[in-house]
């Protein structure tokens, strides 16, 4: 039986949190569907509902940055039907919910190589970014066709192309050539679904992030689970390598 959220938990762990940025590996959509004898597509659709609810929780508690792992560079190896469904789901979600997200003051940014996507989807993505670029609410960063090694490789190529001398290259130089330029590094990385690995996600950015792993599948991730993650974060001693 789940423990009900009480006001003290919210007040102590959420309303006073110093968290600015949470990154999430949204894992478990397919396993959730399989356990309920549903097609994988239903799991991914339910995952969109969880993302929508999580964005609103971030707004409720004043957490400014949410970065989610939606489609990795490795996900192209999945079945063609599933890949096509995920592409169509992204397009459908943006087309259907963009106006509402805009009204809710959400700022959307995509992280990853979107040039590899079909032209129509790129157009939809660029429209979402342009329409919300001046919003001041939750910053929703969607890692799509994203891989951290690919990101770092592209950053190095860009630095070389710009002719920056080796002795002038700093950590900040690299950071400013990543997809997350001008976005603060995550304070907390949450992975749902119980797997204990990073999966090529934000390798540079999470160098000093705290990590929280829950067995809860992403479609079932809600307010209570978010509060548990924040509560644990608030009880950790962040030393940043010192």
Image (cartoon, grey):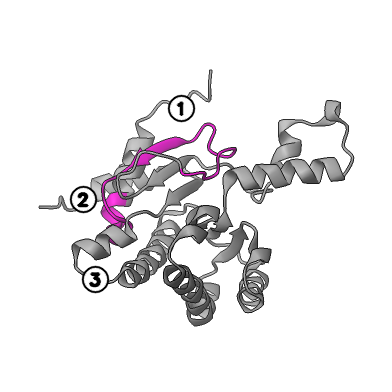
Decide: few, some or many residues near mark 1? Use Cα within 10 Å; few <14, some 14-19, many ≥20.
few
Secondary structure beneath dot 3 equals loop
Look at the numbered discs 1 and 3 and tell me whether their residues touch, using CB distance below 8 Å. no
- Farthest left residue? 1
Q: Position of residue 8 (x, y in %)?
A: 25, 45
6, 33: nearer the viewer: 33
Q: Which quadrant of the figure has residue 110?
A: bottom right
Between the residue at mark 1 and the residue at mark 3, the CA separation in whole angstroms equals 41 Å
Look at the numbered discs 2 and 3 and tell me whether their residues touch, using CB distance below 8 Å. no
What numbered label is drawn on residue 6? 2
What numbered label is drawn on residue 38? 3
62, 124: nearer the viewer: 124
Secondary structure beneath dot 2 equals loop
Q: Position of residue 6 (x, y in %)?
A: 21, 50
Decide: few, some or many residues near mark 3? Use Cα within 10 Å; few <14, some 14-19, many ≥20.
few
Secondary structure beneath dot 1 equals loop
Between the residue at mark 2 and the residue at mark 3, the CA separation in whole angstroms equals 33 Å
120, 240: nearer the viewer: 120
Magenta segment's dominant SS is loop
Q: Which label's residue is closer to the chain start, 1 or 2?
A: 2
Q: Which label's residue is closer to the chain start, 2 or 3?
A: 2
Q: Is residue 126 left or right of residue 73?
A: right
The residue that appears at 63% across and 48% down in the rendered structure is 183
Could you tell me how many numbered marks the image carries?
3
What numbered label is drawn on residue 238? 1
Q: Which residues are magenta?
A: 199-225
Decide: few, some or many residues near mark 2? Use Cα within 10 Å; few <14, some 14-19, many ≥20.
few
Is residue 221 a member of the stretch shown in magenta?
yes
In this rendering, which labeled residue sits more in front, label 2 or label 3?
A: 3
Q: Is residue 117 left or right of residue 81?
A: right
In this rendering, which labeled residue sits more in front, label 1 or label 3?
A: 3
């Amino acid at each position: 039986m789940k423990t009900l959220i009480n006001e003290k938990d919210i007040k102590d762990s959420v309303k006073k949190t110093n968290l600015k940025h949470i990154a999430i590996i949204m894992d478990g959509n397919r396993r959730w569907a399989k356990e309920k004898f549903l097609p994988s597509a239903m799991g991914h659709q339910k995952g969109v509902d969880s993302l929508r609810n999580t964005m609103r929780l971030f707004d409720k508690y004043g957490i400014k940055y949410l970065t989610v792992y939606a489609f990795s560079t490795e996900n192209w190896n999945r079945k063609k039907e599933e890949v096509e469904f995920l592409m169509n789901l992204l397009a459908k979600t943006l087309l259907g919910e963009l106006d509402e997200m805009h009204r809710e003051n959400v700022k959307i940014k995509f992280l990853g190589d979107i040039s590899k996507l079909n032209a129509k989807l790129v157009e939809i993505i660029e429209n979402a970014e342009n329409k919300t670029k001046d919003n001041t609410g939750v910053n929703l960063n969607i890692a799509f066709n994203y891989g951290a090694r690919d990101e770092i490789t592209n950053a190095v190529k860009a630095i070389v192309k710009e002719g920056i001398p080796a002795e002038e290259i700093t950590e900040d130089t690299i950071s400013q050539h990543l997809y997350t330029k001008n976005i603060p590094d995550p304070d907390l990385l949450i992975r749902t679904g119980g797997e204990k690995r990073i999966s090529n996600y934000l390798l540079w950015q999470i160098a000093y992030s705290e990590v929280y792993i829950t067995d809860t599948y992403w479609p079932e991730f809600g307010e209570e689970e978010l509060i548990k993650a924040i509560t644990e974060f608030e009880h950790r001693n962040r030393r940043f390598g010192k």
